Amino acid sequence: MANEIQLLDKVHSRIDELRTSLNALESQVHDLMDIEKAEAVMNTTGGNMGLTLFVFALAIFLGVELITKVPSQLHTPLMSGSNAISGITIVGALIALRNVPADSPMVIFLGTLAVITATVNVVGGYLVTDRMLGMFKSKKEG
């Protein structure tokens, strides 16, 4: 009987430890959810504008450096290959437009403009690539 009582005491103490651990874990989850909400608010209000501008400036310098190092014979094939990147831009702009609050018409306008511009870029790039590749096809004499 004494062993059973000791075993029950151990079980009860272990249950109490688990409850304490569960409460601590629940508190951490709530804290994380609050952090995620704060990050979501910052992302929709432009809280990362400094980082965004830094990445933009870095992309400009990298692009200029890359383009100046490419021989002129490779510019057209390189640009035709970059159409896939513009396609990714379209997907990103559509995803960004999906998450825009309805009460911000300027953001909606700029997002729509980004989608239209990227689409024109992709279509024009594929037309130029098709024309360039057409120059290398053999001409059939009729």
Image: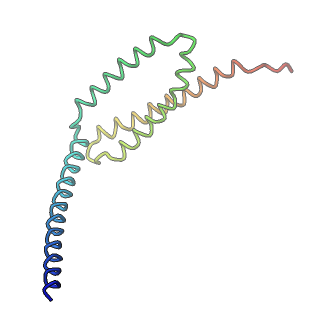
Q: Nearer the viewer, residue 117 or 45?
A: 45
| Quadrant in the rendering for residue 5 | bottom left
Residue found at x 55% / y 24%: 80
Residue found at x 31% / y 27%: 55
Could you say where residue 11 lies in the image, as x and y percent from the top left? 18, 77
| Quadrant in the rendering for residue 128 | top right
Could you say where residue 107 lies in the image, as x and y percent from the top left? 30, 38
The residue lying furthest to the right in this view is 142
The image shows residue 125, relative to residue 67, as above or below, that is below
Residue found at x 18% / y 58%: 30
Residue 16 is left or right of residue 79, and the answer is left
Q: How many marks?
A: 0
Q: Nearer the viewer, residue 24 or 6?
A: 6
Residue 130 is left or right of residue 36, and the answer is right
Could you say where residue 82 lies in the image, as x and y percent from the top left? 50, 26
Residue 55 is left or right of residue 38, and the answer is right
Q: Which quadrant holds the C terminus? A: top right
Residue found at x 39% / y 34%: 113
Could you say where residue 26 lies in the image, as x and y percent from the top left? 19, 62
Q: Which quadrant holds the N terminus? A: bottom left
